[in-house]
Amino acid sequence: MKQLLIHLLLYCYWESEREFCQRVWENKISNFRDELEFSCRSKTLYNYFLNCVDSVYLKARKQAIQKTGLPSATFPEQCPFTPEEILNSDYFPDV
C-alpha cells in the first residue's frame, strides 16, 4: 500500500518528472493495485487496509518528499485519495 501511495503522489505532484515517467508510474500503480486488490479479497485484510490508510499515507508522503526534494507543502498532509480511488484500477489522478 505504501508503494502505491508513493507512486500516486509522484504521479500527481512531481510535475517536472511527469512527462518522462508518467507511463512508468501508471504501470507501477497498476501493479501495486493488483497486489493490494488480491490481499483485500480477505475481509479482515480489507478492514485492516481501511484502518491503516492514514498512517501509511504519512509514511508514503515522507518518502515522496525525500525522493523528489520538493517542499513538504507540495504534498497534502492528509491522504487526498479515497480508499475507493486507491483500489480503482481505472483511477489515475487528474494532473
Image (cartoon, rainbow, N blue to C red):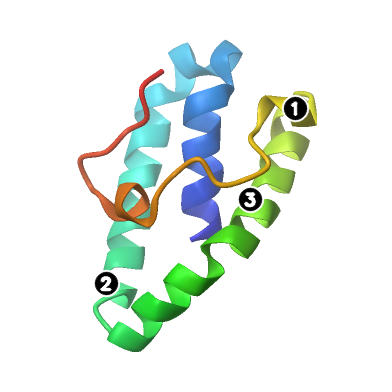
Residue 39: x and y, percent? Answer: 33, 76
Q: Residue 11: x, y in percent? A: 47, 29
> In the displayed image of the protein, which residue is found farthest to the bottom?
44
Q: Residue at x 35, y 76 (%)?
A: 46
Residue picked out by circle 3: 60
Q: Earlier in the sequence, mark 2 or mark 1?
A: 2
Q: Secondary structure at mark 3?
A: helix
Q: Residues within 10 Å of mark 2 (few under 14, many from 20)?
A: few
Image quadrant in which the C terminus is located: top left
Residue under numbered circle 2 = 38
- Describe the element under mark 1 as helix, strand or loop: helix
Task: Give the amino acid at mark 3.
Answer: Ala
Residue nearest the viewer, comparing 94 with 78: 78
Binning the other alpha carbons within 10 Å of mark 3 as few (below 14), some (14 to 19) or many (20 upward) gives many
**Relative side of 62 to 91, left or right:** right
Residue at the spot 59% in from the left edge and 12% down from the top edge: 16
Left or right: residue 18 compared with residue 27: right
Q: Of the residues tagged 3 and 1, which is closer to the observer?
A: 1
Q: CA distance from mark 2 to mark 1?
A: 33 Å
The residue indicated by pointer 1 is: 73
Q: Residues within 10 Å of mark 1 (few under 14, many from 20)?
A: few
Q: CA distance from mark 2 to mark 3?
A: 21 Å
